[in-house]
Amino acid sequence: MTRAFLLTNLDTASQPFKFQVPLDIIGSSIPDLGGFPHKPGERPWHGKTLFVKGTKSKYINKNNIPIAKEFFPSMSLETLDAGHWGTCGCLYSKESTN
């Protein structure tokens, strides 16, 4: 499962390949990640929490939004016309990157 997660974050468009997530931070946080409560509602966070969903991504979907709300009861969900990484023309125009 860990390998599958990491491979979804591998950027193969550049040489050499690189990960889009900070592996050093994830690696040093493994004990904390492993201790995460796996039962929805076990230890909810009641602070404000923003989830950003890309319409072209399957990772946040109608099946797991209710579960996310059990962990983050005050969550809000914003949707972008984008993929998993939020790449979309709505954030910047091509002219502004030149």
Image: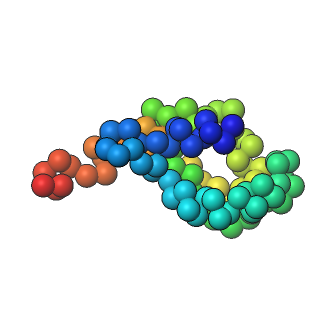
Residue 97 appears in which quarter of the rendering?
bottom left
Residue 73 visible in the current orientation: no
* Above or below 23: residue 47: below
Q: Position of residue 75 (x, y in %)?
A: 64, 55
Q: Position of residue 23 (x, y in %)?
A: 55, 56
In depth, the one of 49 and 7 nearer the eye is: 7
Give the colouring mode of the picture. Answer: rainbow
Residue appearing at x 50%, y 34% in the figure: 57
Q: Position of residue 8 (x, y in %)?
A: 52, 38
Q: Which residue reaches farthest front? A: 16
Left of 98 or right of it: where is 34? right
Q: How many marks?
A: 0
Residue 73 appears in which quarter of the rendering?
bottom right
Residue appearing at x 31%, y 43% in the figure: 14
In depth, the one of 21 and 54 nearer the eye is: 21
* Above or below 38: residue 55: above
Residue appearing at x 46%, y 49% in the figure: 19
| Image quarter in which the C terminus is found | bottom left
Residue 21 visible in the current orientation: yes
In depth, the one of 67 and 31 nearer the eye is: 31
Residue appearing at x 44%, y 45% in the figure: 85
Q: Position of residue 27 (x, y in %)?
A: 63, 59
Q: Which residue reaches farthest bottom? A: 47
Left of 13 or right of it: where is 19? right
Left of 83 or right of it: where is 30? right
| Image quarter in which the N terminus is found | top right
